[in-house]
Image: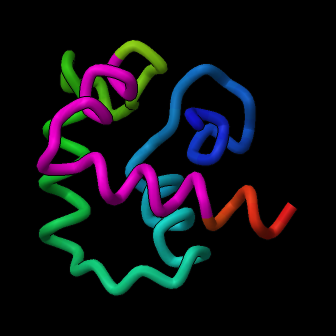
């Protein structure tokens, strides 16, 4: 599921990668909500979400729906 966002396979993704993925799956989420999700996931504030950050955030009910939707959409396209 992490690779749906880490499309460059660097082991991390930026807010721009998150925005690109959200737009690619057709979700209508505002900039503020995307930034809220990203800030919650970026545990050390370095501007990147690592796989450890990612798996910690996807288990939170508040954001789980987004990551599940993104993963499902990307899998259906492949």
Give coordinates of residue 57: x percent, y percent: 25, 31
Is 37 in the magenta? no
Give coordinates of residue 43: x percent, y percent: 20, 20
In the depicted structure, whether residue 12 falls above or below residue 6:
above
Judge by depth and name the residue closer to the eye, 46 or 41.
41
Give coordinates of residue 42: x percent, y percent: 25, 29
Residue at x 22%, y 74% (from the top left corner) = 31
Residue at x 26%, y 30% (from the top left corner) = 59
In the depicted structure, whether residue 29 falls above or below residue 18:
below
Q: What predominant SS class does the magenta segment belong to?
A: helix
Residue at x 38%, y 51% (from the top left corner) = 15
Find residue 2 and report its image quarter: top right
Q: Is residue 37 left or right of residue 66?
A: left
Magenta span covers which residues?
Answer: 53-72
In the depicted structure, whether residue 25 falls above or below residue 2:
below
Q: Image quadrant for the N terminus?
A: top right
Judge by depth and name the residue closer to the eye, 44 or 24.
24
Q: Image quadrant for the C terminus?
A: bottom right
Is 56 in the magenta? yes
Judge by depth and name the residue closer to the eye, 40 or 55.
55
């Amino acid at each position: 599921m992490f690779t749906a966002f880490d499309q460059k396979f660097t082991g991390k993704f930026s807010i721009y990668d998150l925005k690109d993925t959200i737009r690619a799956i057709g979700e209508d989420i505002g900039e503020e909500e995307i930034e809220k999700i990203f800030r919650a996931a970026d545990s050390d504030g370095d501007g990147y979400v690592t796989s450890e950050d990612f798996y910690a955030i996807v288990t939170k009910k508040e954001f789980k729906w987004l990551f599940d939707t993104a993963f499902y959409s990307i899998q259906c396209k492949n």
